[in-house]
Image (spheres, rainbow, N blue to C red):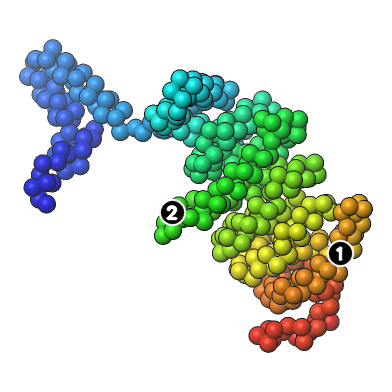
Amino acid sequence: MSENRSNQQPTQGLLSNEDGSLAAPMFLFVVSIALCLSGKWIWGVALGIGALVIAVCNAAGTIEDKEKHEIRFNVMQAADIFKVMLRWEAKYLFEYQEKKQEDVQVEREGRVIVLAGLGVLVRRYEQGHKTDICALVCQEAVFLAFRRFNKDNEIMIAALSLLSIIGKNEKVRQRVLLEPDTFGLDMPVGVITKALVRAKYIENDEEREMQAAELQRKGFLSLGVLSDKASDLARKVAQEGGVEAALDAIDWFRHHADVVNWALWLIFIVCYEDPSNKIAVIQHHGIPKIIEAMHNCPDRLDVSRHGVAILFDLMREETATCQPNEQIDIWRIRETARSAGLHDVVLEILERYSEASDVVMMGNELLAGTGYTKTTLSPSVQIEELD
């Protein structure tokens, strides 16, 4: 083992190597100073320049390709960053047409470009470049990533992050509705759904599991931002399977509180005062899954708040006023909730979060509307009957 270590070359730095020895640039620089002091100026200056060139080359060699592109993109306009990404896509398509198969090297190059570009665009937009033009360019970049790297979780997290910060822009929202073939919600919902399928095959790899969970969280956040206070987009999310995707994620990532929270938030955004979307929740067995989610994440107020809010909205009498083909049976919903353990969960929430007035109000309404009595509780719950 010691012989192998002795044969290894020390990693070069600017001042010293990892083994503590003097790095070549620094050694040459010291020699150049000595030559200058001895009166040999020409040799000293030449050696100093050589030391500087070697140092710069060593520094450049330590910079990863992604960092090189980030440095380059940091001084470019958003539109120019997207042009670089677009030129890569054109190259990728050309190579694919020529070789009738994917070029691994070109794809690897594109991955670095797209990942770096998305990261810089996120920072650029967050730093105040929130014009309509910048938002639309960012949208183009997001959907290019969806087209080419929808199986790459790292890139999808970056793309969904960018989508979440531009989702409130009205031009971006209009484009989703007017150009569904290019910017339709089927693409982000598809990314989330397929990523969850892949996540179910992850075994004994905590890092990959956390990355998969983060993709789900970012996905539900971006869909919620897009559809918040936009009923037409909310209905599109439901039509493309967004509600089902959120419920599936709640079921699989049941102990990932952040995933559960943002999935519940999306469901609330999409279903609020929209009977057809509420039907989607009911049809996909959403009521027991939501109650179970609150039970599994008792330490998160936001999970409890969003879960209670969804159930409160589902059980309101106004919900029953639907179109003829959108009939909702309120009493059946309430009975389903009772059977799924609503009373136990809500009473635990009321005890834990007694200072959260909105949660307390909705929780008491849920109990009153579902015929709460002390005898309906499991023996483990020892709380006095509500007035």
> Is any atom of residue 67 visible in this view?
yes
Q: Which residue is mark 1?
A: 329
User: Which is nearer the eye, 70 or 146?
Assistant: 146
In the rendering, at what x and y percent does residue 222 appear?
Answer: 65, 44
Residue 158 appears in which quarter of the rendering?
top right
- Left or right of 226? Residue 387 is right
Q: As shown in the figure, which amino acid type bears the numbered disc 1? A: Asp
Residue at the spot x=73%, y=83% of the render?
A: 377
User: In the figure, 147 relative to 280: above or below?
Assistant: above
Badges 2 and 1: C-beta atoms under 8 Å apart?
no
Q: Which residue is mark 2?
A: 207
Depth-wise, is mark 2 or mark 1 nearer the camera?
1
Element on which disc 1 rests: loop
Residue 254 appears in which quarter of the rendering?
bottom right
- Left or right of 152? Residue 31 is left
Q: As shown in the figure, which amino acid type bears the numbered disc 2? A: Glu
Instruction: Name the outermost residue toward the top.
Output: 42
User: Which is nearer the eye, 218 or 320?
Assistant: 320
Element on which disc 2 rests: helix
User: In the figure, 29 relative to 151: above or below?
Assistant: above
Residue at the spot x=84%, y=54% of the render?
A: 275
